[in-house]
Amino acid sequence: MDLNKWPRQTDIKDHDIFDDAHFMSEAPGVIYEKKAVTDPGGNPVQGLYTAWITLNNPAQYNSYTTKMVKGVIAGFHRASMDRSVVAVVFTGAGDRAFCTGGNTKEYAEYYSGNPSEYALYMDLFNGMVDGILMCKKPVICRVNGMRVAGGQEIGMACDISLASDLAVFGQAGPRHGSAPVGGSTDFIHWYLGMERAMWNCISCELWSAYKMAHLGLISKVVPVLKKDGEFMRNPQVITDQFVDGGQIVYGEFVQGQAAAEARKLVKECSVDFSLLDAAVNEVVWTLTNLFPHCLMMSVDGVRAKKKFFWDQSKLASRHWLAANMMSEAYLGFNAFNNKKLTGKDQIDFIRYRQLLSEARPFDQELVDAVMAPRRE
Ligand SMILES: CC(C)(COP(=O)(O)OP(=O)(O)OC[C@H]1O[C@@H](n2cnc3c(N)ncnc32)[C@H](O)[C@@H]1OP(=O)(O)O)[C@@H](O)C(=O)NCCC(=O)NCCSC(=O)C1=CCCCC1=O
């Protein structure tokens, strides 16, 4: 094929839409960085990169503010359009959390009681999940800690997850006034099967990284705690036994006195993510040594199953979530956000159900009856 037979433009076009305004090093914000792909010997490969998109809001467990959602959209678009990027690494700052979802302070203080504004926010949120699912590079979720609520949703939108063994996974919405319909209810059954998906979504239990690796939610879990210079598996989780009394105990949390001792031990350790980063590099190196277009066709073929349900439900969910800001989200997020003022981070669920069973309308009297009062 002689491409020079007819006139051709020779400039290289830039397909990125967003400028750097959406990225920043100050928290809360999103950091976008390119890091050289390295071979197994640790040598940088010239001209090939991973794009690191980091949720940087560690004081609030890397919950995403509205501004940060825009940063994630911009980051995934930039990485998608950058020819030199092999894969995206999506992670959080610090060692506590990958992300615990939407920023509950914004939810309580701005969006609750304002459904029209939350509808606009949800358009951005949906754009963030679409941005991950549409990214034309494989997306690795580097789970550096808790992946909870909306954090679990954007994490499951990723293609491969590799986790620190301090990470826990689960939902928070039904406890704090929302429903995990920002992706979780569309994705999670593919990973866990319907029965476990249901319980994980509704119970708000947080499950360990070892349990989730065993159940198939994530590809790999690595130790990050170091004591006296040696890596040690998270002592808060059972990893040295599979069955006890006929029950699978691998990946469950240790209980009672053992849990207290484990917590004490963790405090004596330092955290070192070098094994997690090595695991990320190993996946990136495998991806680098594949045909890029055949790779992306394969990725999109698998993603299509997640997208199928997400695309069916995302618009209806946007409308429901907006309306919900007038009722249960108002209660739940204000309860969580004002926990230091009231001493309680949840509403009185029993009283709320009792009032609903009496067909009481959602008015100030009901709100005051179920929310803990301000402490003197
Ligand atoms: C279970 C928790 C994630 C962790 O609990 P714990 O380990 O006890 O830590 P905390 O003391 O609660 O948290 C430490 C500090 O971080 C702040 N924090 C944590 N999460 C958030 C958040 N999401 N937004 C803002 N700030 C957060 C917390 O207030 C503490 O601050 P402090 O000043 O007191 O030190 C627990 O933290 C928890 O349940 N968090 C809330 C999770 C949540 O409800 N997320 C939002 C869910 S809804 C959502 O994400 C949605 C996404 C799109 C679709 C619709 C939707 O609802």
Image: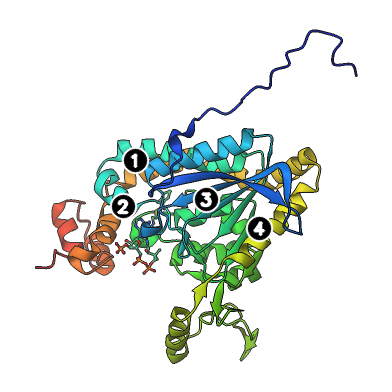
Confirm whether residue 88 shows in the render: yes
| 2 or 3: tag closer to the N-terminus | 3
The image shows residue 290 at horizontal and vertical percentages of 80, 46
Q: Which residue is mark 2?
A: 329
| 4 or 3: tag closer to the N-terminus | 3
The image shows residue 132 at horizontal and vertical percentages of 57, 43
Image position of 1 with respect to 204: above or below: above
Residue 161 versus residue 119: which sits nearer the camera? 161
Callout 1 environment at 10 Å: few (<14), some (14 to 19), or many (20+)? many
Count the marks.
4
Ligand 1's image quarter is bottom left
Q: Residue furthest right?
A: 1
Is label 2 within 8 A of ligand 1 (CB to nearest ligand atom)? Answer: yes
Q: Which residue is mark 3?
A: 154
Nearer the camera: disc 2 or disc 4: 4
Q: Gap in Å between the C-alphas at discs 1 and 2?
A: 11 Å
User: Which residue is painted at 62% across and 25% down in the image?
Assistant: 14
| 4 or 1: tag closer to the N-terminus | 1
Q: Gap in Å between the C-alphas at discs 2 and 4?
A: 37 Å
Q: Quadrant of residue 358?
A: bottom left
| 1 or 2: tag closer to the N-terminus | 1
